[in-house]
Image: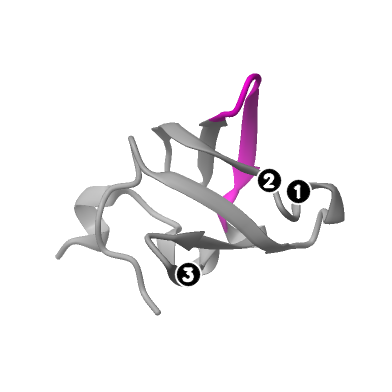
């Protein structure tokens, strides 16, 4: 599924990742850049979008579909 909305303020969970230490990581998105998601869960973690699959609002989203600026995704 392709994600077209913004992520800031959303609670996400990493369900798959090239970095296995990130699997199961949950937190609130506090910032989003073209290639990164920054989450807060007691500490700040930066996640590379293209290397993860996340769950948001009960939907599974491939991070590759979120690469790019928000303004370009909502077109």
Identify the residue position indicated by label 3 in the image. Answer: 61
SS assignment at label 1? helix
Q: Residue at x 60, y 28 (%)?
A: 41
37 and 26: which one is in front? Answer: 26
The span shown in magenta is 40-49
> Are the residues flagged by discs 2 and 3 in contact, CB closer than 8 Å?
no
* Other-residue count near label 2 (Cα within 10 Å), few / some / many at <14 / 14–19 / ≥20: some
Identify the residue position indicated by label 2 in the image. Answer: 25
Q: Looking at the picture, how far across and down is residue 60, in whole percent?
A: 49, 72
SS assignment at label 3? strand
SS assignment at label 2? loop
- In this view, the residue farthest toward the top is 43
40 and 51: which one is in front? Answer: 40
User: How far is disc 3 from disc 1 in space, using C-alphas?
Assistant: 15 Å
Quadrant occupied by the C terminus: bottom left
Q: Earlier in the sequence, mark 3 or mark 1?
A: 1
Instruction: Say which quarter of the image contains residue 8.
Output: top left
Quadrant occupied by the N terminus: bottom left
Residue 48 colored in magenta in the image: yes
Q: Residue at x 55, y 61 (%)?
A: 54
User: How far is disc 2 from disc 3 in space, using C-alphas?
Assistant: 15 Å
Q: Which mark is residue 22?
A: 1
Is 33 left, or right, of 74 in this rendering? right
Instruction: Say which quarter of the image contains residue 17.
Output: bottom right
> Are the residues flagged by discs 2 and 1 in contact, CB closer than 8 Å?
yes
Q: Looking at the picture, how far across and down is residue 64, in whole percent?
A: 52, 67
Q: Nearer the viewer, mark 2 or mark 3?
A: 2
User: How far is disc 2 from disc 1 in space, using C-alphas?
Assistant: 5 Å
């Amino acid at each position: 599924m392709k994600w077209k909305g913004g992520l800031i303020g959303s609670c996400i969970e990493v369900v798959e990742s090239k970095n296995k230490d990130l699997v199961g990581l949950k937190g609130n998105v506090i910032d989003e850049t073209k290639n990164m998601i920054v989450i807060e869960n007691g500490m700040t973690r930066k996640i590379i979008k293209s290397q993860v699959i996340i769950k948001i609002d009960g939907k599974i989203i491939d991070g590759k579909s979120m690469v790019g600026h928000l303004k370009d995704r909502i077109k």
